[in-house]
Image (cartoon, helix red, strand yellow):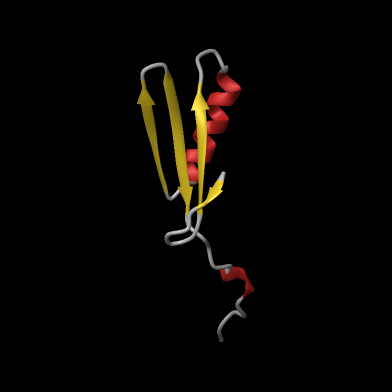
Amino acid sequence: MRRRPEGGGYRVEVPLAAGRGEAAHQELLTVLAEADRFGHRYSTGAQLAWAEFDDRIDDQSEEPGP
């Protein structure tokens, strides 16, 4: 995981390998579902999934209105 200097937020990159199993597949899908952007990059012999998460403002810290 690394901090994105342009615009803030974070980028997570995960190398993909065959045979990781159903649990690993489900965990990856869970992370991608929460991401603001995601994608897949591949080249000869290597695959990578990536996800970017924008910085969030904590809306729960504000007092409720009248």
Residue 27 image offset from top left, x and y in percent: 57, 32
Q: What residue sits 36% from the left and 18% below the top?
A: 44
Q: What residue sits 46% from the left and 48% below the top?
A: 52
The correct choice, above or below, for 51 with respect to 55 in the image is: above
Residue 12 image offset from top left, x and y in percent: 52, 42
Residue closest to the eye, 63 or 2: 2
Count of numbered circles in the view: 0
Q: Quadrant of the N terminus?
A: top right
Q: What residue sits 53% from the left and 39% below the top?
A: 31
Question: In the drawing, does residue 43 fall left or right of residue 54?
Answer: left
The correct choice, above or below, for 34 with respect to 14 in the image is: below
Q: What residue sits 50% from the left and 33% below the top?
A: 29
Q: Quadrant of the C terminus?
A: bottom right
Question: In the drawing, does residue 43 fall left or right of residue 52?
Answer: left
Residue closest to the eye, 30 or 48: 48
Residue 6 image offset from top left, x and y in percent: 42, 59
Residue 25 image offset from top left, x and y in percent: 53, 25
- Specify the farthest residue to the bottom: 66
The correct choice, above or below, for 7 with respect to 40 in the image is: below
